[in-house]
Amino acid sequence: MPIIEAILGAIFAGLCMGIVSEALYRLNFARSNLLIIDGQFFLENFNKTAGLQVTYIFGTIVHLMTSIGFGIAYWVICTLFQFNPLSLPTISLYVFCLWLLMLFSALPIAGKGFLGSRIGSLVWLEQLLLHAVFGFGLWWSLRIL
C-alpha cells in the first residue's frame, strides 16, 4: 500500500468520524463533539477564544491533520512489521489503540478529564463508537483505493 493511500483513507475515515460525531451531538445522542474539542484545544493553546464557527473551522483542520498523522502511523506500522493493511483485525487493533490513547491521553490533555469525564460519564462509549466508525471508514476506503 502506498503511503498516499493510507493518507487518503485516513482523511476519509476522519471525515466519517467527524460527521457522525457532529450528527450524534446535534441529535443529543452524544455529549462530546470531536470538532469542538479539537477546536477549543487548539485555540486554548494560543490563549485565544473564538465563536463557534471559528472553533469548528480550527477543529476540523486539527481533526483532519490528526487523521492524516494516524494514517501515516498506520502505514509505518504495517510497513515495518509487514502487516496486511487491509486486514480487518489489524485495523481493529490499531483503532482500539487509538481509542485508548484518546481516553487516557488526548481527552485529559484537552482538559476534558480522565476518559472524558468532564463532558459526561459515557464519553468513553461515545468515543468507542466514533473510533469504530473511523476503523470501518479506514478499512472500507483502503479496500477501494
Image (spheres, grey):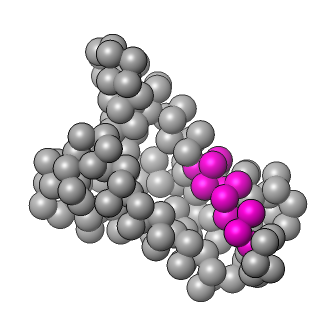
- For the residue pair 106 and 135, the one nearer the viewer reads as 106
x, y percentage for residue 36?
A: 33, 35
**The N terminus appears in which quarter of the rendering?**
bottom right
Q: Quadrant of residue 66?
A: top right
Which corner quadrant holds the C terminus? Answer: bottom right
In the rendered image, residue 104, in percent from the top left (x then y), is placed at 32, 60
Of the pair 104 and 88, the residue shown nearer to us: 104
**Residue sitting at 21 percent across and 56 percent down?**
114
Q: Main secondary structure of the magenta part?
A: helix
Residue 129 visible in rendering: no
Answer yes or no: is residue 73 visible. yes
**Residue 44 vertical position relative to residue 137 in the rendered view, above or below:** above
User: Residue drawn 39% across and 67% down?
Assistant: 100
Q: Which residue does the image show at 24% across and 40% down from the upper left?
A: 111
Compared with 100, 20 (above or below) is: above
Q: Residue furthest right?
A: 2
The answer to if 77 sits in the magenta stretch is yes
Residue at position x 14%, y 48% in the image: 118
Name the side, left or right, on which 71 lies relative to 51: right
Q: Position of residue 72 (x, y in %)?
A: 70, 54
Query: Residue 127 occupies which quadrant of the picture?
Result: bottom left
Residue 15 horizontal/vertical position (percent): 55, 48
Count of numbered circles on the image: 0
92 within the magenta span: no
Q: Is residue 78 left or right of residue 88?
A: right
Bounds of the magenta span?
Answer: 67-78
